[in-house]
Image (cartoon, rainbow, N blue to C red):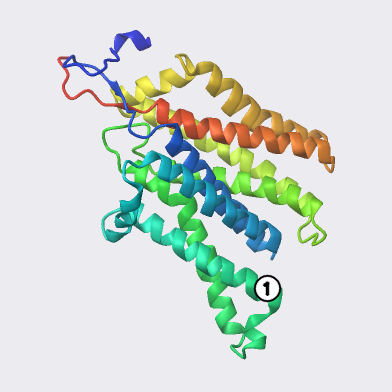
């Protein structure tokens, strides 16, 4: 099927698919920063790596908030989005961010100053705090994917693979940043070889999820086929194949596999992974098209 067989129309009454342009680059930036920061926090949490957890919270708290604000028409009313957790993944996500930052800060302070012992609270309180912080970080990593997967009019998004891709990409980005920060930090909280192996496994999972996402969209509907073709053979082909696949998956896998323990190679792999991850976040918005409202076939 050639992409020309399905007409891409603009703001007209013609039959065909339409690009979605409500969530644009500013939202892609917010998604990227939120997921990356939470992923860095979660991986660092597994190693009790305080510097990494603090860096993750700063990325999410500052940059995700900033890019969300730039997207909103009336930023001062943005707090109202938290009022519908029973029916909205956006509301659940905002609540998760608040819990993630509050309990994450509390956990880092406890690790640094042993507050549970100093205040006579016992280890149980500290354990509950860290579990709440880790769970909230997991929600932050996935809620944006869940919000997108509820968009039934956009087949590329309307799949459980969307939150799964958010989770795997955020864990990959978080793991590679943790690997670099551990090497630069006197804490030396994590094993370099262990993190490298984990990143290679996550890159493989990212690739499998990406293939599955495109395959399912292509098989599901007319709009899904158009989105897939836009990425594989259409206007976004070069960005998708060279940036998301080549730089984001293949290059870092080769660098980490062929040059294990080499910091320069790890640094280049980290830059490539984050570039590919960001490219995925932008392109999944740009290639999202609405299904035709009617068809005469």
Residue 272: quarter of image: top right
Question: What is the x, y in percent for residue 170?
Answer: 56, 46
Question: What is the x, y in percent for residue 48?
Answer: 69, 66
The vertical placement of 238 against 254, above or below, is: above
Q: Residue at label 1?
A: 111
The vertical placement of 227 against 121, above or below, is: above
67 or 213: which is nearer to us? 67
Question: What is the x, y in percent for residue 237?
Answer: 51, 17
Quarter containing the C terminus: top left
68 or 136: which is nearer to us? 68
The vertical placement of 286 against 66, above or below, is: above
Quarter containing the N terminus: top left
Residue at 38% over, 29% down: 217
16 or 97: which is nearer to us? 97
Residue at 41% over, 51% down: 143
Whether residue 42 sits left or right of residue 88 in the image: it is: right
């Amino acid at each position: 099927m050639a992409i020309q067989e399905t007409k891409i129309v603009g703001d007209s009454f013609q039959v065909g698919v339409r690009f979605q342009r409500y969530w644009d680059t500013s939202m892609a930036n917010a998604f990227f920063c939120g997921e990356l920061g939470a992923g860095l926090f979660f991986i660092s949490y597994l190693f009790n790596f305080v510097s990494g957890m603090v860096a993750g919270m700063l990325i999410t708290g500052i940059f995700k908030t900033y890019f969300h604000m730039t997207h909103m028409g009336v930023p001062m009313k943005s707090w109202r989005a938290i009022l519908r957790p029973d029916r909205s993944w956006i509301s659940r996500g905002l609540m998760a961010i608040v819990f993630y930052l509050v309990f994450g800060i509390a956990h880092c302070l406890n690790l640094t100053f042993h507050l549970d012992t100093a205040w006579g609270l016992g280890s149980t309180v500290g354990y509950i705090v860290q579990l709440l912080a880790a769970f909230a970080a997991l929600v932050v990593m996935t809620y944006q994917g869940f919000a997108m997967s509820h968009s039934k009019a956009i087949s590329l998004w309307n799949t459980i693979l969307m939150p799964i891709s958010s989770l795997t990409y955020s864990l990959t980005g978080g793991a590679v940043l943790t690997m670099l920060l551990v090497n630069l930090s006197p804490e030396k909280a994590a094993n370099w070889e262990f993190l490298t192996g984990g990143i290679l496994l996550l890159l493989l999972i990212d690739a499998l999820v990406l293939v599955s996402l495109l395959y399912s969209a292509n098989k599901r509907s007319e709009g899904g086929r158009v989105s897939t073709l836009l990425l594989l053979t259409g206007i976004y082909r070069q960005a998708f194949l060279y940036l998301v696949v080549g730089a984001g998956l293949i290059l870092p896998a080769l660098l980490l596999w062929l040059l294990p323990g080499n910091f320069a190679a790890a640094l280049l792999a980290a830059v490539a992974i984050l570039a590919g991850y960001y490219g995925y976040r932008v392109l999944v918005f740009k290639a999202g098209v609405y299904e035709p409202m009617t068809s005469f076939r």
